[in-house]
Image: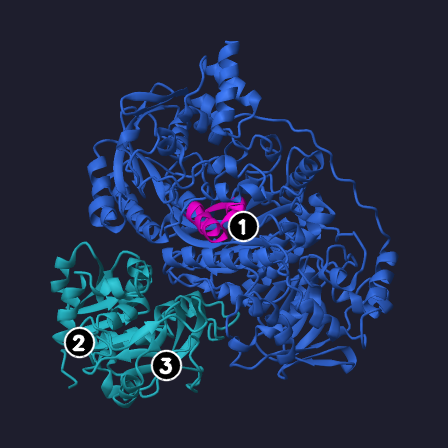
């Protein structure tokens, strides 16, 4: 046995798998022999961090995952939240969240494109129509040439793929930070629509022994071989060329047709009352996907690799079985349904005519053995116990929790913030600071990026990207039910305090959907961290999960799906800023009770909700003014939840013309954005604003800096100030007047001390990214 | 019985469902017909080519689709005077098929929709104004002179290009059916560098219209982003009602329902 174990370790090292020596020993002991190359790569993929969550699982179990809005919780390819009822049918919104960080660093166009390809399949395989996507992006500094290349190519890749498949982009977010210079973060969220009774599960149905395993999609090739374990490694400059082979090749054109053909298959399954299993091929390829399908149903599988359509002759069995060629899905259907399934893909949607070698084919059978057996040219190349393969391994990694930040007294914070404000260059003015805040890359208009994406295909978009804090879709034609998607996750906060940043990410995502009148129904997270074998990095991860859990419990919103991306560290030892990125799906019962975030008309009151706090840690103002502070805003969850209640109630009563949440840049940047986006919605003329002195708990001498504090809250445009204030009061919240909208295209400060032209501000706000992304308007 | 309209779906089409919805909303009897079933097309009286990326826009946008067998019955119908509407990728296909402007031989385009001058796909809300005498567009029966329609320009290849003498002919002979404008009809520069700021082309007989922006993406009140949605309206029936861009389909429906009379 010792010889076998040693031989297994030697074989593993020779094949270059990422499995540790210990893991190889365990496998050899379990099999009682040296694994075949196909088995070796199968374990390499299934036991990778990417597939098995081996470092993270014990911590993820802390997240709240249950609640009345959850239709299908964590466990399958995507979670599902309740949307509501229409015409006697109950509908759900499928939500999935993934990262494609490593591939996007190596080949950014393909990496970002295949990120969408993968997440779209995760939603599709739940039996859903894919209705929207969004990308949270974290780029390095644009001063760095390679970062510029990555930042351009990622956006191009998202546009090329998303636009072609015809799924609207409902709005992602972008931050720039040096910690992403060597490791870009490309996360992607996708939404789907499904009737509750039509959900398809990613498992072999009960008693499905003898059913067909059908592989659908692109011909299998060498691309994407070793992708799962690659994404669990650190990136090394020298391996760049070799790593490119681990990235899949996107084919949105073929995906477009596969999606539509799959919708036709769904319709037939329903018409015939047939149960089936459906899952996308992602990490771990064919063996991973069909293995997980059968394992989830307590079944086994016997697969003939010779039946798999391949793009090249003589592909080795391990590539056919484990390679991660894109645009493939796997069905488990009763043999009686197989001819119709094949006809839909191969004849009606003529996949073989559209792409060489593409199509649907039976490649194996479900068994009741509990084993995964794969044959190639008459030889058994894989024969393993499925639960052992898909169960993966677990690690309890050591970690060091971050030091709690040193408290700073409010007086100290205020004084220092005002000192930083007064120390500005040139004449010290509110609006000269505003201009600098608006031209900060994390605040500047994202419009040139959004314009690259199709945000309105499918004709279901009520609020496209950039028009409000969240995108809004009306997914069921004729029904007033709407869905909002909002994001959160600020790397500047992450660097200061991972746990608090995670809490603020949840608050931000919830605030974003609330600003358009939605009720949060579910959260998803993508946890992007550095190397988990470094105790401080693992500690940041553990702290962030605790933060997410705290915020989600406090706000009563469950997590329904998520993803973990570790090892975001370069060979030079640069770890990414702890980046818990959160998406919130909200529901709106009636689409006539929502609004964009732009000022609509002169003469309205501008009201603020939220508990003002002079915490400038991680703020844009602190960064540009050089204010050295680590204090992040405290979160009073009960008060924040009441503010959210005010917003929804005000929408219900028709009191709100526009609302935005206070985020990067603070309250003044928020008001400026509401004015700057007003032009298209108010007869091509800007709606300006005249600001009032804001009442805060701050020392009056520190009032100026207060405009740039970032704290949970909202800015609202309301016609009837008193009615709005009464609604707020009834919820136990004080609505503060902070200005009025005016017909002149300017912002005017309190007591008319200074004014700034909106056209002028528009340039400061739009130029930073417009110059980079190069659109002409 | 109302006229039957085929929405022709190519591999890569992505706007067929919302286009079908717009046609049904104006009372037409419309259905999707897939590329794998060209034989079905003979039964229809009018045709709509929706947006997308047919055949991946290989060679040029619309070029491969224009040569697909499924286009044979469409071209035949267009030549027989039946109405054919192409939106976005559908417009590109009609140009590549030579049906618009229709000044040259079939499938030898005399004008084409080339990559935007921004060098990128661009999705922006726009308005377009009728730029020809209403008598030039029998495919939009009853449309008023100078009518303004809201839409989304969402394309990578929407820039009209043609040799100078051909452009002059298109302008002079009223082939530039729509141009980009403000909501009040004031002329504005095209968002993509299109020659003559053209947003749409029509053939000589006026039965084939190729329009780049998507009116079906701004054809319901809830889709309006130009302030016409009505903030705080709290009227869900009004919010879900067709309006704005739907008018283009209403005029198309009037044309399709009326017995066709040649404009020539």
Residue receiving disc 1:
A186
Provide the letter of the chain coloured cyan. Answer: B
How many C-alpha atoms fall within 10 Å of the one at disc 2: few (<14), some, or many (≥20)?
few
Can residue A74 be seen in this snapshot? no
The chain ID associated with circle 1 is A
Q: Which SS type dominates the magenta stretch?
A: helix
Does the stretch in magenta take in A100? yes
* Residue A102 left/right relative to A327: right
At mark 2, the secondary structure is: loop
Residue receiving disc 3:
B195
Q: Is residue A305 above or below residue B64?
A: above
Residue receiving disc 2:
B105
The chain ID associated with circle 3 is B
Q: From mark 1 to mark 2, how far is it between C-alphas?
A: 48 Å
Question: Which residue is drawn at the image coordinates 50% and 41% (left, top)?
Answer: A243
Front-lying residue, B46 or A2? A2
At mark 1, the secondary structure is: strand
């Amino acid at each position: 046995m010792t010889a076998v174990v040693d031989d297994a370790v030697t074989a593993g090292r020779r094949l270059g798998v990422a499995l540790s020596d210990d893991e190889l020993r365990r496998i050899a002991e379990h099999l009682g022999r040296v694994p075949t190359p196909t088995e070796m790569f199968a374990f390499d993929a299934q036991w990778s961090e990417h597939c098995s969550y081996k470092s993270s699982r014990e911590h993820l179990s802390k997240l709240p995952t249950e609640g009345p809005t959850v239709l299908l919780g964590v466990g399958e390819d995507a979670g599902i939240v309740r949307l509501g009822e229409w015409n006697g049918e109950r509908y759900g919104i499928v939500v999935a969240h993934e990262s494609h960080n490593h591939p996007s660093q190596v080949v950014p166009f393909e990496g970002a494109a295949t990120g969408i390809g993968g997440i779209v399949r995760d939603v599709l395989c739940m039996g859903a129509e894919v209705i929207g996507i969004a990308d949270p992006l974290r780029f390095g500094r644009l001063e760095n040439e390679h970062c510029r290349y990555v930042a351009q190519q990622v956006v191009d890749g998202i546009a090329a793929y998303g636009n072609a498949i015809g799924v609207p982009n409902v709005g992602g977010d972008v931050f720039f930070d040096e910690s992403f210079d060597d490791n870009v973060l490309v996360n992607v969220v996708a939404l789907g629509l499904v009737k509750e009774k039509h959900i398809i599960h990613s498992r072999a149905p009960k008693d499905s022994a003898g059913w067909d395993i059908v592989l659908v999609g692109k011909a299998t090739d060498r691309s994407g071989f070793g992708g799962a374990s690659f994404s669990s490694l650190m990136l090394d400059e020298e391996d760049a060329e070799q790593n490119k082979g681990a990235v899949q090749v996107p084919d949105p054109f073929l995906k477009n047709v596969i999606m539509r053909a799959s919708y036709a298959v769904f319709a037939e399954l329903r018409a015939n009352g047939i149960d089936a299993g459906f899952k996308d091929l992602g990490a771990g390829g064919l063996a991973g996907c069909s293995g997980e399908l059968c394992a989830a149903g307590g079944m086994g599988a016997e697969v003939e690799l010779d039946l798999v359509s391949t793009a090249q002759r003589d592909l080795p069995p391990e590539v056919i079985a484990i390679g991660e060629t894109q645009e493939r899905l796997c069905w488990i259907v009763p043999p009686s349904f197989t001819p119709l399934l094949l006809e839909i893909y191969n004849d009606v949607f003529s996949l073989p005519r559209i792409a060489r070698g593409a199509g649907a084919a039976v490649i194996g059978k479900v068994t009741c053995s509990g084993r995964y057996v794969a044959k190639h040219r008459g030889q058994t190349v894989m024969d393993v116990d499925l639960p052992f393969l898909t169960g993966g391994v677990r690690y309890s990694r050591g970690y060091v929790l971050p030091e709690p930040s040193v408290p700073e007294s409010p007086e100290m914070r205020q004084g220092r913030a005002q000192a930083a404000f007064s120390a500005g260059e040139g004449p010290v003015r509110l609006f000269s600071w505003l201009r600098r805040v608006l031209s900060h890359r994390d605040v500047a208009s994202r419009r040139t990026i959004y314009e690259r994406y199709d945000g309105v295909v499918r004709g279901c978009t009520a609020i496209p990207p950039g028009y409000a804090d969240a995108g809004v879709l009306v997914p069921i034609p004729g029904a007033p039910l709407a869905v909002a998607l909002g994001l959160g996750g600020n790397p500047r906060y992450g660097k200061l305090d991972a746990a608090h940043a995670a809490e603020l990410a949840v608050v931000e995502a919830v605030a974003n959907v609330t600003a358009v009148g939605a009720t949060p129904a579910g959260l998803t997270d993508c946890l992007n961290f550095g190397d988990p074998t470094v105790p401080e990095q693992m500690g940041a991860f553990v702290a962030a999960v605790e933060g997410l859990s705290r915020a989600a419990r406090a706000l009563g919103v469950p997590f329904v799906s998520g993803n973990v991306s570790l090892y975001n560290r370069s060979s030079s030892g640069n770890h990414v800023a702890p980046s818990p990125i959160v998406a919130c799906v909200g529901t709106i019962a009636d689409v006539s009770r929502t609004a964009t975030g732009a000022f609509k008309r002169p003469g309205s009151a501008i009201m603020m909700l939220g508990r003002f706090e002079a915490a400038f840690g991680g703020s844009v103002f602190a960064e540009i003014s050089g204010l050295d502070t680590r204090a992040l805003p405290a979160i009073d969850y009960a008060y924040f939840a009441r503010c959210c209640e005010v917003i929804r109630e005000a929408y219900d009563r028709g009191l709100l013309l526009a609302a935005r949440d206070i985020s990067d840049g603070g309250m003044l940047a928020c008001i400026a954005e509401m004015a700057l986006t007003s032009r298209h919605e108010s007869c091509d003329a800007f709606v300006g604003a005249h600001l009032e002195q804001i009442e805060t708990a701050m020392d009056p001498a520190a009032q100026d800096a207060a405009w740039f504090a970032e704290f949970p809250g909202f800015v609202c445009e309301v016609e009837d100030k008193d009615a709005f204030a009464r609604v707020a009061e009834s919820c136990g919240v004080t609505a503060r007047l902070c200005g009025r909208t005016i017909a002149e295209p300017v912002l005017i400060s309190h007591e008319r001390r200074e004014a700034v032209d909106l056209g002028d501000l528009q340039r400061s706000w739009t130029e930073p990214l417009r110059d980079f992304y190069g659109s002409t308007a | 019985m109302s006229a039957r309209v085929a929405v022709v779906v190519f591999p890569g089409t992505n706007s067929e469902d919302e286009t079908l919805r717009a046609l049904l909303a104006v009372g037409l009897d419309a259905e999707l017909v897939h590329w794998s079933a060209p034989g079905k097309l003979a039964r229809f009286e009018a045709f709509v080519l929706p947006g997308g990326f047919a055949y991946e826009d290989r060679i040029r946008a619309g070029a491969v689709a224009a040569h697909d067998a499924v286009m044979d019955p469409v071209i035949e119908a267009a030549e027989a005077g039946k109405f054919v509407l192409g939106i976005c990728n559908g417009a590109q296909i009609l140009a590549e098929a030579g049906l618009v402007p229709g000044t040259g031989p079939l499938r030898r385009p005399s004008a084409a929709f080339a990559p935007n001058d921004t060098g990128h796909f661009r999705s922006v809300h726009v308005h377009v104004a009728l730029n020809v005498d209403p008598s030039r567009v029998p495919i939009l029966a009853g449309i008023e002179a100078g009518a303004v329609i809201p839409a989304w320009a969402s394309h990578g290849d929407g820039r009209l290009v043609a040799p100078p003498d051909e452009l002059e002919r298109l302008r002079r002979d009223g082939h530039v059916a729509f141009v980009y404008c403000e909501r009040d009809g004031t002329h504005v520069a095209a968002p993509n560098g299109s020659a003559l700021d053209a947003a749409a082309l029509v053939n000589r007989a006026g039965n084939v219209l190729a329009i780049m922006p998507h009116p079906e993406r701004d054809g319901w009140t809830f889709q309006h982003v130009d302030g016409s949605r009505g903030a705080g309206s709290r009227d869900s029936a009004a919010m879900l009602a067709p309006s704005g861009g739907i008018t283009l389909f209403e005029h198309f429906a009037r044309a399709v329902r009326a017995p066709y009379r040649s404009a020539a």
